[in-house]
């Protein structure tokens, strides 16, 4: 087992949806299970990809806004709970990891990096999914979009809380994500960043400002070595 070079990168924090997890098809299926009883049209995969990134509540809000308007507060609260219950239930759709995800996590752990997960997905479905996909053992800290009340990416405090839980410093960590929120969060936290090219970013990738852009997760170890 090798160790990170002294004084350089020690921790790697991943986003989840669009970075490790190809969640759009399953989020689309779950959203449409909520929309249909409400008399709304189904949303498409392309629409859902553009709605991902700010947590489940925003996703549902955008789906209803796109199909006829957001319901009143009380009804919307019930629909949001229903969405979470379905998404974390036994009959939930099966999410899929992107190519190279497992190999990359295994390599990084073998190299003795400390790994964290910082996602705007609510913590309950996050924990369910990483358990079902048998990847929870790789992460020493996991934080969802509702883990810290009122704080989620791009607020740098979300990422900084994960780094603190890992017992590391911003200078010793790298954030890996797919969207503007991930990279803006990293910049404001003083953390180096890697942007994957296959996620759900809204802006042209070069405009987001990541330190590096990669096309497949198996590139991560080599980029980390370059950073050191």
Image (cartoon, rainbow, N blue to C red):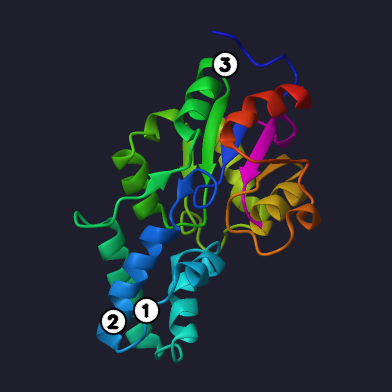
Mark 2 in CB contact with mark 3 (< 8 angstroms): no
Q: Which part of the image, by quadrant, shows the N terminus?
A: top right
> As drawn, is 79 to the left or to the right of 112?
left
Q: Residue farthest to the left?
A: 90
Find the distance from the CA under tag 2 to the CA under tag 3. Answer: 47 Å
Find the distance from the CA under tag 1 to the CA under tag 3. Answer: 45 Å
- 1 vs 3, front mark: 1
Does the image show residue 141? yes
Mark 2 in CB contact with mark 1 (< 8 angstroms): yes
Answer with the quarter of the image where residue 60 lies.
bottom left
In the image, residue 177 lies in the stretch drawn in magenta: yes
- Dot 2: few (<14), some (14–19), or many (≥20) neighbours within 10 Å? few
The tag earlier along the polypeptide, 1 or 3, is 1
Residue corresponding to mark 3: 111
In the image, residue 207 lies in the stretch drawn in magenta: no
The tag earlier along the polypeptide, 2 or 3, is 2
The percent coordinates of residue 6 (x first, y second) are 72, 14
Residue 42 is labelled as 1
Residue corresponding to mark 2: 36
The percent coordinates of residue 213 (x first, y second) are 72, 42
**Toward the viewer: 218 or 150?**
218
Q: Which residues are magenta?
A: 167-179
The tag earlier along the polypeptide, 2 or 1, is 2
Residue at position x 53%, y 21% in the image: 107
The percent coordinates of residue 15 (x first, y second) are 55, 46
């Amino acid at each position: 087992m090798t160790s990170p070079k002294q004084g350089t990168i020690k921790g790697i924090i991943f986003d989840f949806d669009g970075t490790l997890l190809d969640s759009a098809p399953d989020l689309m299926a779950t959203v449409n299970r909520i929309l249909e009883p409400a008399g709304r049209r189904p949303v498409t995969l392309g629409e859902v990809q553009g709605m991902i990134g700010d947590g489940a509540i925003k996703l549902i809000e955008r789906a209803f806004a796109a199909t006829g308007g957001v319901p009143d507060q009380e009804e919307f609260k019930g629909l949001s709970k229903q969405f979470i219950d379905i998404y974390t239930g036994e009959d939930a759709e099966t999410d899929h990891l992107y190519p190279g995800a497992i190999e990359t996590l295994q390599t990084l752990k073998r190299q003795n990096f400390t790994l964290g997960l910082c996602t705007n997905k609510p913590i309950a479905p996050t924990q369910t999914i990483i358990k079902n996909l048998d990847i929870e053992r790789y992460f020493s800290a996991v934080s969802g979009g509702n883990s810290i009340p009122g704080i989620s990416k791009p607020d740098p405090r979300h990422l900084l809380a994960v780094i603190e839980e890992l017992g590391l410093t911003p200078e010793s960590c790298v954030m890996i994500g797919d969207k503007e929120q991930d990279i803006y969060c990293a910049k404001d936290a003083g953390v180096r960043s890697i942007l994957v090219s296959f996620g759900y970013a809204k802006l042209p990738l070069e405009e987001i400002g990541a330190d590096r852009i990669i096309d497949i997760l198996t590139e991560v170890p080599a980029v980390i070595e370059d950073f050191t």
